[in-house]
Amino acid sequence: MLSRFAKRSFSSTAAANYKVSVLGAAGGIGQPLSLLLKLNHRVTSLSLYDIRGAKGVAADISHVPTNSKVEGFTPEDEEGLKKTLTGTDVVLIPAGVPRKPGMTRDDLFNINASIVRDLASSVADYAPNAAVLVISNPVNSTVPIVREVFKQKGVYNKNKLFGVTTLDVLRASRFLSEVVGTDPTTERVNVVGGHSGLTIVPLLSGTKHKNIPQEARDALIHRIQFGGDEVVQAKNGTGSATLSMAQAGARFAGAVFKGLDGEKDVIEPSFVESPLYASEGIDFFASQVTLGPNGVEKIHGLGELAGYEEELVNVAKETLKKNIIKGQEFITKAK
Ligand code: NAD
Ligand code: LMR
C-alpha cells in the first residue's frame, strides 16, 4: 500500500487524503457541516456518526459527486463508533443540545459534558492521533473535558485539541463591515479569549479601522460577544446557529487540513491549551494559532492591545478560569 506521502507526491494537486469523522452529524450543525466537508477535495473519507439519523444523512450526502466515500453509523451498528473513528485524521464534534432563549452556554453543561466525555473516550480509543475539533457548548468547558479524558487514557497531545471559535471570527468580520461600510470578505479580525459572552474578545485595534467612534465601537464589540443570542432569539426555541456554524467549522477544518498538508502560514484563532495565561491558572485561551503538519505549530501572543482591550481580556479571564476548572473537575473529581 502506498504511504500517504507517496500518494501525495504522485498526485497532480497538492491535496492529501484525509479521513474525517463528524460526531453529531445528523444535527442542525452536523448536516450542513458534513455537506461542506464533502465538498472539500482534501477529504477522501467522511464518516458520520449520530445517535440517530446518520445513515440517512450519509446516503444523501454520498450522492454529491466529489472524490470521497461517505459512511454513516449509529449505536445500532455493532462497534459503530469504532468503525466511524478508526483511521480518522480529523474529528469534528458538534454533538449535544443547543440553547433556547434565556439560557447561557454554561446552562448546557449538565447535558453536554457527559456527551462530550463519552465521545472523547471513544476518540481516545479508536483515533488517538486525530486532531479533535470541539464545537459542542460550552466550548470553554468541553475542551478541558476532552483534555482530561485523553490524559486519563494516556493519549493527550496538546497540539491536536482545538475549541472551534471561528464563528466569532466570521461574525466579527461581518459585523465590522456593516459598521465601516466595507466588503466583509476583506475584513479579518482576531478574536481571542473563549467562546461565550464576555469571554469573546475581538481585537479591533488590530484591524485597519482604528478610529471607530467609541459608542459605535462598544456596540460592535457587544454585538460580536452576544451574536449567538441574536440567532437563539430569532430561532425562538428551535435551536441556535447551525448554518453559519457549519461554514465556520468547515473553514476551520479546512485550515487544519492545510496545516497537516504542510502549507505555510496557515493561521486561525482557536481555543487551545496555551501558555499565554497559564501562570494565572488559565490553561486554555483562544488566540491566533499557526497550524502545521502536527497540529498547533505556534501560539501567537495578543500583540499590542488598546487600554479598553486589556480591560476586556481581564474580564474574560475571570469567567474563563471558572469555566475551564469546571470542565476539568467534571473528569478529575468524578465519583
Ligand atoms: P442539534 O440538536 O441540532 O444537533 C445535535 C446532534 O447531536 C443531534 O443530531 C443529536 O442526535 C446528536 N447527539 C446527541 N448526543 C449524541 C451522542 N452521544 N453521540 C452522537 N451524537 C449525539 O444541535 P446543533 O444546533 O447542531 O448544536 C450542537 C452543539 O453545538 C450545541 O451544543 C451548540 O450549543 C453548539 N454550537 C457551538 C458553536 C460554536 O461556535 N462552537 C456554534 C453553534 C452551536
Ligand atoms: C453561537 O455562538 O452561535 C453558538 O455558541 C451557539 C449559541 O449558543 O449561541
Image: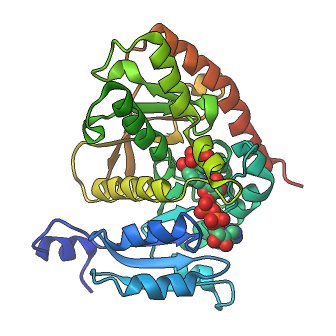
Q: Nearer the viewer, residue 330 or 244?
A: 244
Q: Nearer the viewer, residue 294 or 246?
A: 246
Q: Is residue 127 visible?
A: no
Please name the colour scheme applied to the rendered image.
rainbow
Work out whether 307 lies above or below 45: above
Kindly give the residue lying farthest to the left in the view shown. Answer: 12
In-front residue for pair 330/210: 210
| Image vertical order of residue 135 relative to residue 92, above or below | above
Which residue does the image show at 48% across and 84% down from the upper left?
58
Position of residue 272 relative to residue 69, above or below, is above
Name the quarter where the N terminus is drawn: bottom left
Tell me if residue 56 can be seen: yes
Task: Kindly identify the residue that appears in the image at 45 percent across and 85 percent down.
Answer: 60
Q: Residue furthest right?
A: 335
| Vertical comparison of 33 with 233: above or below | below
Q: Residue at x 22, y 70 (%)?
A: 5
Give the quadrant of residue 116. Answer: bottom right
Position of residue 292 measured from the top left corner of the image (x, y, whole percent): 32, 50
Q: Position of residue 212 (x, y in %)?
A: 37, 15
Residue in the image at 21% along x and 67% along y: 15
Q: Is residue 19 left or right of residue 316?
A: left
- Please tell me in which quadrant of the rendered image residue 118 appears: bottom right
The image shows residue 162 at horizontal and vertical percentages of 50, 49
Quarter of the image where ligand 1 sits: bottom right
